[in-house]
Every structure is written in structure tokens, then in C-alpha cells.
């Protein structure tokens, strides 16, 4: 057993460094459904099987075709052509990772929706690939009502498309790339003030002076500045420059009057802007505090919202308008003792704040008749540490995107001010779907069809724009190009989308990193992409 | 339904996806593009591609190329398979651990994609010369080292032929280079001699983090400092596994030793956070990696090849990708550097006073952002003879030439306008510098 765990640790080492053991656990407890084992779908699953998704189920009623064998990474051997596509794909994916449990249902998704729509309720996530519009909308409806996240993915010629549909997706660990530090220098908490006071810069030994953390130095000089400036922090560029000058003057000089080399002071001067960042609550978090789910905590409230509420309570009480202290500080030039003791001041305060939040959590849980153990200390601490980075994503139902009254007309029209915007590719995808509805096939699949289909497709474009009242110009070139594609699924585009979609799936399952909202278009001709909210 | 495999090894519908692009005209194709059935034939029968690296990107690239119709593929990789590769390098299985990546990858593709012929090379790229590289139409890199990229870049630049100062386009071999790190990646197209090369944009690569020695030696603050202390200072001193035994990041016993020592050091300074995973990460300079990012970047690469070779106008040449928050791509045109030390053919200058020590020149070569050499070897022609002024890579020569570092350029007998030849791992060819004395 222990061996198997170490082996898994080794195997997954490179990804554990991204989403941690708890992220991996979420992945291993997930069961994903893929509808249609087309090349794009196989690629997506490959990228979920390799990192160790718990289980997958493929729903596909097709038999394997010559095209499939040419296109799928699994390199189906000639023998497997006798199998149905779902089974063949399942077997080959299993090979990639024996820890994963693979299943297949040889059934047309439409039939499944007719006979047993609740089949789809058991999944953590359903991914549909190359699915006809009508089936897609039906499936979307079932999943929306069951609150199962739905990811639609298409590869159409040199265009890739993804649509995420999820009622509410909460993210505690968004892992922002450029997070601001939480140093509280503009409003130091009591323990920090005491710690700063314990330093006597002027009477320190030379070695101590040049190894005092820049945070202390800035804090000390801020105290001095405030006394001389009516308790106002440096506000504009002029004042900040003056403050930097004050710091410069703090550098010790040698007998000749030349300044010594004190790198910690250099760091302090460089970090003045960072230090003076106001410690205020981000708007995104304020929005969460004002949300209905935060205001009304019930026994059905997910842990996320109970904790949001508890943090809001904290802000209004113990926090005195501020979020719980994060507790981490960046590395800075200092001797070990000074750095560690400063770090501990922040760390201990963070623990204290988390404990206060915890008490608020407990009282809310009790009020709705739940046990405090429902939400662990560990989860609360993680939540507090990430309080400034919380995100909630809502990706509306397909029926709203498709509804004539609810279509996001403005978004579409304004994007189309640039007629070559990726939005035109979205409109073309919708148009080929109309074409399919009318002719039971996609345009230009066979060479002899291309010329006539251009005319037919153009009519579809017009009727689509008219139906939604969209006064935009779709260039003929795009109509021609989409006929040229002949609904091909080039492997390289399928591979790109397979990677993109798989990563979004991992975000949804682990609740780490932030998923896109809600339509992603990839233009493989120009190698550009765009995200729209439709 | 059985498959009717024809004499070419193909069956009905096999290339239908690819054919739609090669045999149909379109409004966005390159002005010189002519749809024809011959292009597919060229792809299948003649086009020769070299893939460098059979790791995260390499596996994806090989698959994409094979399924896009490329049949004559060579792959070079000097590594063997490790367990930690299996979360993304899907051409390998547990049973393949320890075997050469290039060979296992080639076997996998050859046995599963009928008609495809991948030739493996379990070697370093530096073990091949121009005659090897010259045979390819395109070279695609999935490397994990900037040094290797620069070497490859230099090699292709050395293949360029100039007739009366004009570049002969048939001597250009396009280089497509990709890289990934966690959820970030990039891909670029380089037409040696025409577009920006790797060295033109060296500043785009973030510098490697190296902690200052005084921090490691006497003022640790982070768990990483404790680990570096064990690796850099304690290991050479204590030689825990014997004389001359170097620290091997792949040896769990070695890592365990470093881990224990790091814990002891951390305890001394009340530093928390030293874990086995962190220890391994620091010692091996591990970069996190997942299948999805590699799939995305590799997915852009053959598109670029199709672009470069066949159909579409190759637009901007550098793409970056990041899917930490939603999905973000950005494409721009990296510009050539006028005085690039690799591709500009502009003679490189070294400006130093005659009283400068050779050490200063060495530091300039390694620290200058546009040069970033690793262990340059400097030679000059003195009194008609070729003299090595300093060379690091061979211990005996290093020892002999070390005293030169403290000598001034004048003392070494160098004159104003003198040419210095510098060799380094970052380039297959020596770089010539002209020494200009400043007052």
C-alpha cells in the first residue's frame, strides 16, 4: 500500500506541485462523462486520464470509421475497426493509466436523453464534443436542472470552440499570478506596531542596522513621516519621492560621510510603492459580501458561503474593516533572527484572525442546526489565507444564450465592430448548426458540395442574424472558409482544444485556478483566441 | 467492416481531415498557395522532420506529426524514462522506465501508426554535425534547456549560405521552438537569417534564481536556503557517499541525505517548511508540468508548420499561452536584434581599458543580458600562435590558465583591435569579438 502511494507520488510529482495533494484527491474522486469519442474528445480524456482522474464514462453510439483511425491519437489499430467507437476508445485510454476506471455506454446520446436522462446526474462533469445543436441543448437543459457542470467543446476546421455551463462555481485557491503582499503597513495591527517599536534603528550596531528587514525600516520611517505630516501617509508621487529621500538619509555613513552599502535600505526604497498600497478589500470580495448567498445562510448553504459570511462578520467586528491577515511575507535581506521573528508576527496574527473567523463559522453552523466539524479548521485557515483572492464564476444556461430575448446582443454587436474579430467565428459556428438543422448535414463535406453550399450557408447566416436582430456584417470570406472546412476535425486543432478543455475540467473538479467565462474561441489560422460572455 | 489497407498503407478516409486543407482553395490561404493533391504526397513521402526532445512536448509533437501525415521523422533525446514522466509523456509506460526516451517513443509510433517511420537517436544534439541537420525540411524543438536551444539556433545559422551577401533561401531550415512550465507555454517560428532568432530575444527568458552565498552560508531565512546550504556547502565538504561522488538528484538516497541535513539546518534557525518534495524541487530545479499545457503548445506547432510549409500566411512569430485564469493567448512579432551575437553577422565588440583584468572580460561575457554565456573559453592569436587565455571546462587547462584571470589585458599581450575567439556551450561556432581599448 505504502509502495503504491509512493509510486503515485512519484508519478504525479510534477502536477502535485501545481494543485497539491488535496487537488489530486479531488481529481481521483471525480467521474467525468464524455459524450462522443471524436478525436477532440479522446484528446480531452487523455489529458484527464494521464493526471489520474478517478473514472470516466464515454457515451457514443458510433462505429469506428476510417477517418477515426486516421485521426485519433490512440492510433487505433486496424483490428479495432470492428468495435464501436466508445469501447475502442475506452480500452485504449485505460492503457495510459491503470489507476483510472474507464467505462463506456454504446448508445446514442439522444436516445439516452429520451429513456434515462437521470443517467447524467451521477457525474462530476459532463463534456460533450462535436455534438449536434439540438442534442446539445437538450443535454444542457438536463444538466442545468441537475446542477451538473457542462463543458461543450468543438473542433470545426481551423476553429476551436468551448462553452462552459455552470450555475455557480466557487474558487478559494485561485493562485493569482501577481498577488499583492499583505503587509498592513498603512494600518499596522497592534502586535506589528509593538514589534516595530522594539527596534531602535539609530542606536543599533552597524551589522544589525544593515540586516534589519525593509518592512521594519519603512514602518519606522512611516511613523516619523506621519508625526510630521498630520498623520497622513505619503499620497502622491511627490510625497512618495520625499519619503524615499527620507529613507535614503537613513542610510548610515562612514567617517568620510559617504553612505555605506546597506542593501536592506535599497530594498526599502524600491518597495515604497508596494508598502504604501492601501490594505483594502478587493471589489470582487465586497461583491461576495453583498451576495444573497452570503446574506442568507441556511442548512443548504455550501461551506464556501458559510465561510464568506464568517469573514464578512469578522471584517465588521474583530477585523475592523480588514480581511484576516494573510500571514506570509516575501523574502527580504535580513539576518535569520530578525526575518523569522517578523514572519512569526504576521503568522501568529493570521492564526488569531482565522480562529476568530472560525468562531463565526461555528455560530452560523449552530444556528442552522449543523455540527461545527462540518467545516474543518484546515479549510477555514486556507480560506482566510486566500480571502483576498476568492472568486465565484457563473456561466449561464445555453437556453439563455440561444433565446431571442436573452441573447447578449450588445456583446456580439460591439465585438463585430471589428469584422475579423473571433466573434465572427462564433456566428459562423451557429450558422453551420442552422445549416445542419435544415439539411441534416454540414456544408462542404464533399468537394462537389462546396460551391453550392456557400450559397446555402450564406442564407443560413442571414436568417440567423435576422432572427436575433443582429445588424452586423459577416464577410463572405468566412462563409467560403467554413464551407472549405467541410466539418473537418484536424488533429492539431483537436489536440489544442483537448489540452485547453482538459485544463478547464481540472479547474472545475479541483476548485483551484479560475475557469473561463463562458465562451472560448480559438482561431488556428491566425493563432489567436478570445473569450466572450454569451 | 474490415479495413481495406491499400498498397501505400493507407485506407479510405484516412487523410480526409488533412486533405480538405491541402486540396481546396480558400480566402485566407497564402497568396502562393496552390491547392493540389501533390502536397499531401509531399507530406507523406518526401518531407523530413526532426523533432528534438521526446519529453512532454516531444511526445505530443510526435503524435501530432504522425497523425497529420508526416512519415519521415527523426527524434533526438539523450534522456531515459523516469516515473515522474508518466503523468504526461504518454508514449511511455511503467515498464519503459529506465529506457531511452527516443527509442521507446519511436517504437510506439512506428507500431501504432501504419506507414509512419520514426528514427530514434539516443544522443545529445551536440553529437551531430551540419551534415545531419542539413537533411531536414523543418526542425521542431521541445527542449527543456535554454543552452540547448541556443546551440540548435547556432547550428542552423551556421548552415546558411550567402551568395554575394544575399541569403540563399534554400539554405534556411525553419526552426519551431516550444516550451512549457506549469500552466504557461510559448511557441515560436524562427526562419534563421530572416526572423528573430533565439539569441535576439534572450531577455525574454527569466533569469534563473540563485540565492546569494552569504544568505546561504550565514543568514538563511527560507527553507530553500537551508536546502541549498546542504547541497552547495555540506555535500562537497562531507562527501557522504564517497570521494568524487557528485550529488545525483535522481538518487533517492542522495535526496534523503540532503533532506535530513536541511531539516537540521532549518531547526537551528527556527525555519519551518522543509519537506522532501521541496528538497527534491530545489536540488533538481524541478519545473511543475502537466499534460494539458504540453498538449496546447504542441497543438500550435504543427499548425505553424502547415502555415510555414503549405497554406496560410505565417503571421506573427511568437505565441504565449497562460491558462491560470481563464485562457489567455498573445501573439506578437519578435524583432531581430541589430547586433545579435548569433545571427546579425555584426562583429561583436569588447570595450575595456588595457588595465582591465581578464576576469572582468569573463564576467562581462557571462553576465551581459544579451550574451549570457555559461563557461566561455577565450583564445587569441599572439605572436602568430593560437593561445588559450582561459578555459573552464577541462580541469587541467583551467588550473593552468587560472592565473591569467588576474592579469591585465595589457600584461597578457593583447593589442587594441585584436580579435578574441570565444567558445561556449551556448553555440556550436566560436564567436569573434573585437577588442577595443578604452582610455
Image (tube, coloured by chain):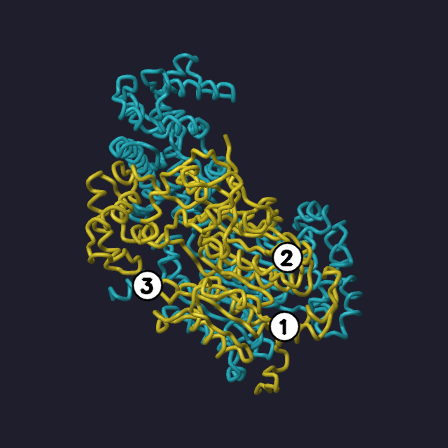
Chain colours: A cyan, B yellow
Q: Nearer the viewer, residue A366 or B381?
A: B381
Respond whether the residues carrying marks 1 and 2 are from the same subunit: no
> How far is disc 3 from disc 1 in space, using C-alphas?
40 Å
Residue A204 spot, x, y in % from top left: 26, 20
Residue B188 spot, x, y in % from top left: 57, 55
The residue beneath circle 2 is A523
Instruction: Kindly indicate whether the residue at mark 1 contacts the one at mark 3 (C-beta within 8 angstroms).
Output: no
What's the residue at 46%, 18% (across, down)? A242
Asked if one can make out residue B334 in the rendered structure from this viewpoint, the answer is yes
What's the residue at 64%, 57% (across, down)? A523
Residue A503 spot, x, y in % from top left: 48, 57
What's the residue at 56%, 80% (across, down)? B115
Instruction: Kindly indicate whether the residue at mark 3 contacts the one at mark 2 (C-beta within 8 angstroms).
Output: no
Label 3 crowd bin: few (<14), some (14–19), many (20+), radius 10 Å: some
Label 2 crowd bin: few (<14), some (14–19), many (20+), radius 10 Å: some
Report helix, strand or loop for mark 1: helix
Residue A41 vertical position relative to residue B383 in the rendered view, above or below: below
Report helix, strand or loop for mark 3: helix
Residue B43 circle label? 1
Subunit of label 1: B
Label 1 crowd bin: few (<14), some (14–19), many (20+), radius 10 Å: some
Subunit of label 3: A
**For the view shown, which residue lies furthest in the front direction?**
B383
Respond whether the residues carrying marks 2 and 3 are from the same subunit: yes
> How far is disc 2 from disc 3 in space, using C-alphas?
37 Å
Residue A85 vertical position relative to residue B398 in the rendered view, above or below: below
Residue A239 spot, x, y in % from top left: 48, 18
* Quadrant the N terminus of chain B occupies: bottom right
The residue beneath circle 3 is A8
Q: Nearer the viewer, residue B411 or B113?
A: B411
Report helix, strand or loop for mark 2: strand
Instruction: Kindly indicate whether the residue at mark 2 contacts the one at mark 1 (C-beta within 8 angstroms).
Output: no
Amino acid at each position: 500500500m505504502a509502495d503504491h502511494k509512493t509510486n503515485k507520488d512519484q508519478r504525479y510529482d510534477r502536477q502535485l506541485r501545481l494543485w497539491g495533494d488535496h487537488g489530486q484527491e479531488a481529481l481521483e474522486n471525480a467521474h467525468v462523462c464524455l459524450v462522443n469519442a471524436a478525436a477532440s474528445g479522446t484528446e480531452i480524456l487523455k489529458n484527464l486520464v494521464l493526471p489520474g482522474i478517478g473514472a470516466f464514462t464515454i457515451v457514443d453510439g458510433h462505429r469506428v470509421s476510417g477517418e477515426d483511425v486516421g485521426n485519433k491519437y490512440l492510433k487505433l489499430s486496424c483490428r479495432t475497426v470492428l468495435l464501436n467507437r466508445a469501447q475502442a476508445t475506452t480500452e485504449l485510454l485505460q492503457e495510459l493509466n491503470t489507476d483510472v476506471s474507464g467505462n463506456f455506454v454504446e448508445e446514442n446520446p439522444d436516445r439516452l436523453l429520451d429513456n434515462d436522462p437521470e443517467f447524467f446526474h451521477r457525474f462530476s462533469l459532463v463534456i460533450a464534443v462535436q455534438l449536434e445543436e439540438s442534442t446539445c441543448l437538450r443535454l444542457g437543459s438536463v444538466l442545468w436542472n441537475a446542477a451538473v457542470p457542462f463543458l461543450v467543446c468543438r473542433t470545426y476546421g481551423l476553429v476551436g470552440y468551448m462553452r462552459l455551463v455552470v450555475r455557480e462555481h466557487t474558487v478559494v485557491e485561485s493562485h493569482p499570478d501577481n498577488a499583492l503582499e499583505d503587509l498592513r503597513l498603512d494600518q499596522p495591527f497592534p502586535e506589528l506596531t509593538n514589534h516595530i517599536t522594539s527596534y531602535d534603528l539609530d542606536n543599533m550596531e552597524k551589522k544589525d542596522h544593515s540586516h534589519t528587514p525593509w518592512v521594519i525600516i519603512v514602518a519606522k520611517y512611516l511613523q516619523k513621516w506621519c508625526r510630521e505630516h498630520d498623520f497622513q501617509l505619503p499620497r502622491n508621487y511627490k510625497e512618495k519621492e520625499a519619503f524615499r529621500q527620507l529613507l535614503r538619509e537613513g542610510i548610515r555613513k562612514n567617517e568620510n560621510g559617504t553612505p555605506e552599502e546597506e542593501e536592506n535600505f535599497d530594498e526599502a526604497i524600491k518597495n515604497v510603492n508596494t508598502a504604501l498600497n492601501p490594505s483594502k478589500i478587493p471589489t470582487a470580495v465586497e461583491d461576495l459580501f453583498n451576495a444573497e448567498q452570503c446574506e442568507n445562510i441556511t442548512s443548504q448553504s455550501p461551506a464556501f458561503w458559510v465561510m464568506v459570511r464568517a469573514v464578512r462578520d469578522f471584517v465588521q467586528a474583530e477585523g475592523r474593516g480588514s480581511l484576516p491577515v494573510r500571514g506570509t511575507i516575501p523574502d527580504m535581506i535580513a539576518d535569520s533572527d530578525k526575518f523569522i521573528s517578523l514572519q512569526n508576527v504576521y503568522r501568529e496574527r493570521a492564526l488569531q484572525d482565522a480562529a476568530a473567523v472560525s468562531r463565526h463559522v461555528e455560530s452560523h453552523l449552530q444556528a442552522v442546526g449543523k455540527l461545527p466539524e462540518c467545516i474543518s479548521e484546515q479549510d477555514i485557515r486556507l480560506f482566510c489565507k486566500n480571502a483576498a483572492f476568492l472568486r465565484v464564476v457563473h456561466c449561464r444556461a445555453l437556453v439563455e444564450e440561444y433565446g431571442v430575448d436573452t441573447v447578449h446582443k450588445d456583446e456580439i454587436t460591439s465585438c463585430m465592430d471589428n469584422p475579423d474579430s473571433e466573434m465572427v467565428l462564433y456566428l459562423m459556428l451557429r450558422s453551420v448548426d442552422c445549416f445542419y438543422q435544415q439539411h441534416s448535414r454540414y456544408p462542404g463535406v464533399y468537394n462537389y458540395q462546396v460551391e453550392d453550399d456557400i450559397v446555402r450557408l450564406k442564407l443560413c447566416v442571414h436568417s440567423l442574424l435576422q432572427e436575433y436582430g443582429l445588424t452586423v456584417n459577416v464577410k463572405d470570406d468566412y462563409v467560403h472558409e467554413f464551407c472549405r472546412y467541410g466539418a473537418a476535425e484536424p488533429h492539431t486543432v483537436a489536440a489544442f482544444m483537448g489540452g485547453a478543455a482538459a485544463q478547464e475540467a481540472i479547474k472545475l473538479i479541483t476548485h483551484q485556478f479560475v475557469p473561463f467565462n463562458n465562451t472560448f474561441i480559438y482561431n488556428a489560422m491566425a493563432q489567436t483566441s478570445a473569450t466572450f460572455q454569451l | 467492416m474490415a479495413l481495406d489497407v491499400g498498397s501505400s498503407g493507407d485506407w479510405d478516409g484516412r487523410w480526409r481531415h488533412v486533405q480538405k486543407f491541402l486540396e481546396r482553395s480558400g480566402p485566407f490561404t497564402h497568396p502562393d498557395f496552390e491547392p493540389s493533391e501533390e502536397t499531401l504526397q509531399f507530406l507523406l513521402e518526401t518531407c523530413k522532420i526532426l523533432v528534438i526532445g521526446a519529453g512532454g512536448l516531444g511526445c505530443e509533437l510526435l503524435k501530432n506529426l504522425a497523425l497529420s501525415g508526416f512519415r519521415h521523422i527523426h527524434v533526438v533525446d539523450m534522456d531515459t524514462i523516469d516515473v515522474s514522466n508518466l503523468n504526461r509523456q504518454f508514449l511511455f509506460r511503467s515498464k519503459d522506465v529506465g529506457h531511452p526516451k527516443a527509442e521507446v517513443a519511436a517504437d510506439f509510433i512506428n507500431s501504432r501508426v501504419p506507414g509512419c517511420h520514426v528514427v530514434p537517436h539516443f544522443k545529445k544534439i551536440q553529437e551531430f554535425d551540419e551534415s545531419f541537420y542539413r537533411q531536414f525540411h523543418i526542425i521542431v524543438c521541445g527542449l527543456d534547456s535554454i543552452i540547448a536551444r541556443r546551440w540548435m539556433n547556432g547550428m542552423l545559422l551556421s548552415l546558411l549560405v550567402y551568395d554575394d551577401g544575399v541569403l540563399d533561401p534554400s539554405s534556411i531550415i525553419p526552426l519551431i521552438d516550444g516550451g512549457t512550465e506549469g500552466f504557461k507555454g510559448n511557441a515560436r517560428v524562427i526562419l534563421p537569417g530572416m526572423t528573430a532568432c533565439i539569441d535576439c530575444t534572450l531577455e525574454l527568458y527569466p533569469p534563473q534564481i540563485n540565492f546569494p552565498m552569504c544568505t546561504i552560508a550565514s543568514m538563511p531565512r527560507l527553507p530553500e536556503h537551508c536546502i541549498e546550504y546542504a547541497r552547495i556547502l555540506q555535500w562537497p565538504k562531507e562527501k557522504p557517499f564517497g570521494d568524487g561522488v557528485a550529488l545525483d538528484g535522481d538518487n533517492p538516497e542522495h535526496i534523503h541525505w540532503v533532506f535530513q541535513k536541511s531539516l537540521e539546518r532549518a531547526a537551528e534557525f527556527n525555519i519551518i517548511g522543509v519537506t522532501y518534495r521541496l528538497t527534491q524541487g530545489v536540488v533538481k530545479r524541478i519545473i511543475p508540468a502537466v499534460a494539458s499545457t504540453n498538449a496546447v503548445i504542441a497543438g500550435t506547432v504543427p499548425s505553424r508548420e502547415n502555415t510555414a510549409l503549405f497554406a496560410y500566411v505565417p503571421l506573427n512569430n511568437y505565441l504565449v499561452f497562460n491558462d491560470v485564469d481563464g485562457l489567455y493567448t498573445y501573439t506578437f512579432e519578435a524583432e531581430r536584434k541589430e547586433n545579435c551575437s548569433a545571427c546579425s553577422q555584426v562583429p561583436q565588440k569588447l570595450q575595456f581599458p588595457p588595465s582591465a583584468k581578464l576576469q572582468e572580460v569573463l564576467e562581462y561575457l557571462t553576465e551581459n543580458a544579451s550574451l549570457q554565456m555559461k563557461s566561455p573559453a577565450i583564445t587569441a592569436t599572439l605572436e602568430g600562435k593560437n593561445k588559450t587565455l582561459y578555459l573552464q571546462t577541462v580541469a587541467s587547462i583551467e588550473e593552468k590558465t587560472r592565473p591569467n584571470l588576474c592579469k591585465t589585458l595589457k600584461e597578457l599581450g593583447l593589442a587594441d583591435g585584436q580579435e578574441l575567439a570565444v567558445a561556449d556551450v551556448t553555440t556550436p561556432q566560436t564567436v569573434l569579438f573585437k577588442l577595443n581599448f578604452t582610455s
